[in-house]
Amino acid sequence: MFKGLSLDQAPPFEAPLLFLLTAPLWGIIGGLALLFAQSQPQQIGVLHLFTLGFMAQVMIGALQQMLPVVVGVRFPKPTLLSKLIFAPLALGIALFFIAFFGQNFSLLFFAASLLLLALWSFGAITLWRLFHAPKATPTVWAMRLSLLSLLLAAALGAHMAVGFAQGSLGGSFDALLLIHALFAVFGWVGLLIVGVSYQVVPMFYVTPEPTEGFRKWLVWILFGLLIATAAALFFSKKLALALFVTLLFGYLLYGAWTLQLLQKRKRKIWEVSLYYWYLGLVSLFFLPLVWFFDPERFGILFLFGFAISIMIGMLYKIIPFLSWFHTSSRGFFDMPTMKEMIDEKKALVQFGLHLLALIALLLWPKAAAPFLMLSFGLLLWLLIKPVQIYLEYKKKPSPFGI
Amino acid sequence: MIKDFMTQDHRECDNLYAPVEEAISQGDFEKALELFVPFKQAMLRHFAMEEEVLFPKMEEFLGSGEGPIYVMKMEHAQIRSILDQMGEAIEAKNQQKALGFGETFMIMTQQHNMKEEQILYTMAEQLPLEKEKVVEQMKEIQ
């Protein structure tokens, strides 16, 4: 009945760490590149440093960690698999950026192949695991639909990249671009955050738990609206628009509902991850407004205001915890606590820098470049300390001989 | 039945923890210690319910060894150790340490609870255990 089901300790720290710790590097490069980005292709290149480089890497790292906890199954050979996916992904991101930034579109053949290889193998393996979950909780459904969206977004992205490389974009390019963006942003990114938040918000902050019915319905409504919007693009722009605005309000509902949970939280302490949750969720409220005035900026608000904020907030918890956990699992009990691993005051400075970057991106994107570099740079610097502590203890022989 | 009962007990422990942390953050160590004692007792009682009643019953069907139950017991040991250190830090009125252990305790326990609630208790429900009797026996643990 439970064959292959193990509650084994999480995967080795190195497996998710490879993705999580290198993610801010792409953010730093992205900030730098933003300074020099002029043309639209160059902006596409920069954008993907953040979406593929920072966001997808954090999400892949986090999924590796979450899967054993949520589903009770871990990846086969986690460290090797992690490296096998990381190598084509990182190389693919670099080539994708160089191709667009240097307007050397023939490189996109290689970039698209590598990215498709990495994202599809990760997506397919994870989906397969998720469809064998012992129980399909709302989180499991959100993850499944998120990964399906990833597969679609990656396939469309690769298809368009090859079109660029061949110099023939085709008649349906605009529609494909919209569908790619829709599924990448509101499917893959949005649904994963929604699903993970179902688990982590009540647990980390001790908030009330909403009914399973509501959580499941919300996931399906968001995904349903996403599919409907994409389908409507082919026959009625007006209908697609109406459905899309409804989708935005769906996310707004999620934001309002999660905010009220946080307001009722029993853990009253304010810490940097909470500031990030509030910023992320409050950003959702402004989506319809910003979209109405400036459809281009609203994507920035969703990505940087909502998604990246929440991801950074979670990194501040995940990395010190894993460092502590893996060290403690080997029998050490004298290492620093999580709070000692991350300098809270500097983390708040980092939050301030992120907020400034967000405001600048909305008002005058070029001015955001230094804030982005500083924000991601400080983030990386703060996250390295817990990893160093982990590595120091790793060298010591375990008191239990483990 | 087992799942609902044990999940509920997890939540009650969380609810006992939150005010301890609040008292520490306000620097009220006397109040923190007063709240910490029953909270720690509730945690240890929960572990005892599992280790003395539920796990042995499950092991009758699953066998013992390095399976999921073994991992859960290992994590209990890790959590007990943090609780001890957190208690010492509160007694020593060391706010930073106490909050640090608190945060570490919280995340460690939450990921542990998640695994139990999502997987282990679901397994227990699917095994041919006398569920009402198991719950009754667990309630008897002090």
Image: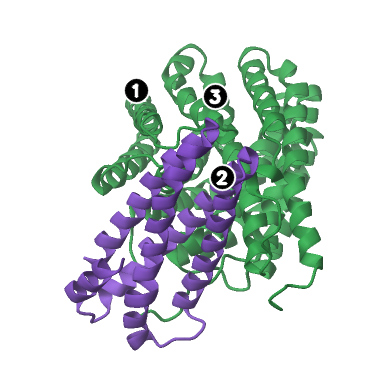
Chain colours: A green, B purple
Taking the image as shown, residue B62 lies to the left or right of residue A280, namely: left
Q: Secondary structure at mark 3?
A: helix
Letter of the chain that mark 3 sits on in the rendering = A
Q: Mark 3 = which residue? A: A301
Determine the residue positioned at 74% across, 16% down.
A367
Q: Tell us which disc is closer to us: 2 or 1.
A: 2
Say the numbered circle drawn on residue A238. 1
Q: Tell us which disc is closer to us: 3 or 2.
A: 2
Q: Secondary structure at mark 1?
A: helix
- Between the C-alphas of marks 3 and 2, the distance is 42 Å
Using the rendered image, report if marks 3 and 2 lie on a common chain: no
Say the numbered circle drawn on residue B90. 2
Instruction: For the residues labelled 3 and 2, say whether their Cβ atoms are less than 8 Å apart.
Output: no
Determine the residue positioned at 51% across, 29% down.
A280
Q: Is residue A47 above or below residue A106?
A: above
Task: Determine crowd level at label 1: few under 14, some 14-19, many 20+ residues with C-alpha closer than 10 A.
Answer: few
Q: Position of residue A15 (x, y in %)?
A: 67, 62
Determine the residue positioned at 43% across, 51% down.
B37
What amino acid does circle 2 point to?
A: Ile
Q: Position of residue B50 (x, y in %)?
A: 36, 71
Letter of the chain that mark 2 sits on in the rendering = B
Q: Which of the pair A273/B48 is nearer the observer?
A: B48
